[in-house]
Amino acid sequence: MEAKTAKKTGKKLVIVESPAKAKTIGKYLGKNYIVEASMGHVRDLPKSQLGVDVEDNFNPKYITIRGKGDLLDKLKKLAKKSDKVYLATDPDREGEAISWHLANILKIDEDDKCRIEFNEVTKNAVKNSIKNPRTVNKNLVNAQQARRILDRLVGYEISPLLWRNIKWGLSAGRVQSAALKLICDREEEIKKFVPEEYWTIDCILSKSNKKITTKLTAYKGKKVVINDEKTTNEIVEALRNNDFIVTKTKTAEKSKSPLPPFTTSTLQQEASKKLNFTTKKTMSLAQQLYEGIDIKGHGIVGLITYMRTDSVRISDEASSSVLEFIRGKYGDDYAVQNARVFKGKKNIQDAHEAIRPTYIDITPEVAKETLSRDQLKLYTLIWNRFVACQMSNCILNTNSIEITNGDYKLKASGSTIKFEGFMKVYEYVADGEEQHGLLPVINENEVLKCIDIEPKQHFTQPPARYTEASFVKLLEEKGIGRPSTYVPTISTLLDRRYIERDRKNLLVTELGNIVNDIVSKFFKQIVDIDFTASMEGKLDSIEEGKEEWTKIVHDFFTPLKKDIDIAEKEMSKIIIEDKVSDVPCDKCGRMMVIKHGRFGDFLACPGYPDCQNTKAIVIEAEAPCPKCGGKVVVKRSKRGKKFFGCSNYPKCDFVSWNEPVKDKCPECGSYMVKKYSKSLGNYVECTNSECKHREVKEQKDVQE
């Protein structure tokens, strides 16, 4: 008896990764298509075991991800009834691997042209992809498979050693451990740094009552380096005793070019600097913009191109479209004559375009009625950056003067915008670029009046701690990971408590240092930056069909296995002693220790299990409550953000995002709070909105 065959519906099945994307694409394709979401990966290596047969050419054992069984049954039934199945997962290695797993599960022949991909979720892009299906790219799949197996071998072979010898729950990772070492190395540089004193001298001169700030730059033709106050005073005295004579003037036009459109890395960096977004938040919002949002007057549209890319390439169609838009909105003078072509870095994955708007006419003004506040902020950033990249250069009028005072030379410069060009939509200041207005018209041999001489003492600063933005930039420069791995790498380090955030800075914890020391000692290959970067190149070679994935894994695992065997024998038992607090247990008298739990640190009696007493850790501010005089304690919001509140709550309702200080405002008597900014460093500010008195308390010690 023949088996029953499913009755065909005459429809085509399209499988994407997310429901949001499915909803958008469903609107584009119409009633003859059924669009379903796989909800990400459907098969993976098992969590309970290694899942890789190292004796059989590293053959992986894939299982259905828990909770995906019913979904796969549904997809199987739909596939049997459909005339054609299209796999439309994301256009990268992970997406290709998901399509490969789906093809296997749905029993689609490997020669079947079932794979479609698009860099943007737009009607044209989706419909064109349907017209041009291809087979699943096994090279891309093998590159993803190699990465997954390499990461599994490191994680599942090394992490148990850390559990047994250090502390349960710790982990090592192929990219994670190399990234942790970078942060530990920076902290070591900061600890070893010895500040050195140096002085600068500014001379405030004037012409026709207009002030000119000049900087002392040279003495007898050589750069001035001043290391002590005595020398500074001698120079100041010498300057006071001579005339300030203008010896050289120069006027010129300077052309400033726009930045290229965003890559994943540069978007994360700029969103951190300009919007104060974490890398995780930036990518979550970008995913929403990519997958599709219902825009008033336009329907459901994907607003940006694929957000995981390290390419700055722009399609000819997109360039033409934005140039036409610029000419229409800003005028011909603001558009470049020929579209700019930006050069990317070597060894990038250029399969995708840069991150750009999909429809240039959906301006931020058009989108703002629909988008959330944060979605709009990110979309505006992406839209402005893309439009600016095809606009004319900004033209600056610049002038500079050189001044001689005896054997000393001073300089001053200034600039104004002659033609704003791209700066009309996207302003940026390059590193080291100072902005001053134009100097007054000054002739050579003029003698300028000295209003004041300002000597300033400085101390060299240690290397800056990494922020998420600067760390992503470093990972990209070092070739550690790829656009898709920057966020999960940082998230893992934070989740494991190897690092923590302090303002925007990433600080290594005591636990992070211990893990780094152990992994660095026994597994030098894992934390070697060059080795980790070269492995990314080998994965690229697999993707290009130049290398066999099993050979790459074998060459990696053979020396690693030797290190594991040595570590098994030599890694001594290391116990991380709990930090002893100064709080006695009120049940048995022992000094309580600091433990870490799911919701943060807490105090516990070391006499467990005989004594099971625990307490919350209360951190008090130095200043009393400005309202009632009670104790001010550190609290956490529902989202985990730190704030300060009175311990007498609810009798006293004092709360503040900033820590109050003991000193009252000398001008109005209101209470003041601690604050920080990149330009000022640490300072205190009056909370009275009509006063806003401010005092800089210490020299800036944190940089971007």
Image (cartoon, helix red, strand yellow):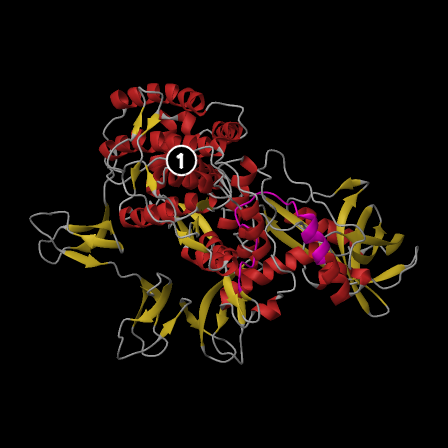
Q: Is residue 296 toward the left or the right of residue 149 in the image? A: right
| Badge 1 density bin: few <14, some 14–19, many ≥20, Cα 10 Å | many
The answer to whether residue 289 is above or below residue 64 is below
Q: Is residue 649 toward the left or the right of residue 673 in the image? A: left
Task: Describe the element under mark 1 as helix, strand or loop.
Answer: helix
Q: Which residue is mark 1?
A: 177
- Front-most of 71 and 113? 113
Residue 304: in magenta span: yes
Point out residue 492 in the picture as x, y percentages from the top left corner: 37, 44
Q: Is residue 195 visible?
A: yes
Residue 101: in magenta span: no
Taken as a whole, is the magenta stretch helix, strand or loop?
loop
Over which residues does the magenta segment extend?
300-322
At horizontal 60% and vertical 39% (from top left) the residue drawn is 350
Dividing the picture into quadrants, the one containing residue 680 is: bottom right
Point out residue 137 in the picture as x, y percentages from the top left corner: 49, 34
- Front-most of 264 and 250? 264
Dividing the picture into quadrants, the one containing residue 439 is: bottom right
At horizontal 65% and vertical 40% (from top left) the residue drawn is 344
- Front-most of 377 and 432? 377
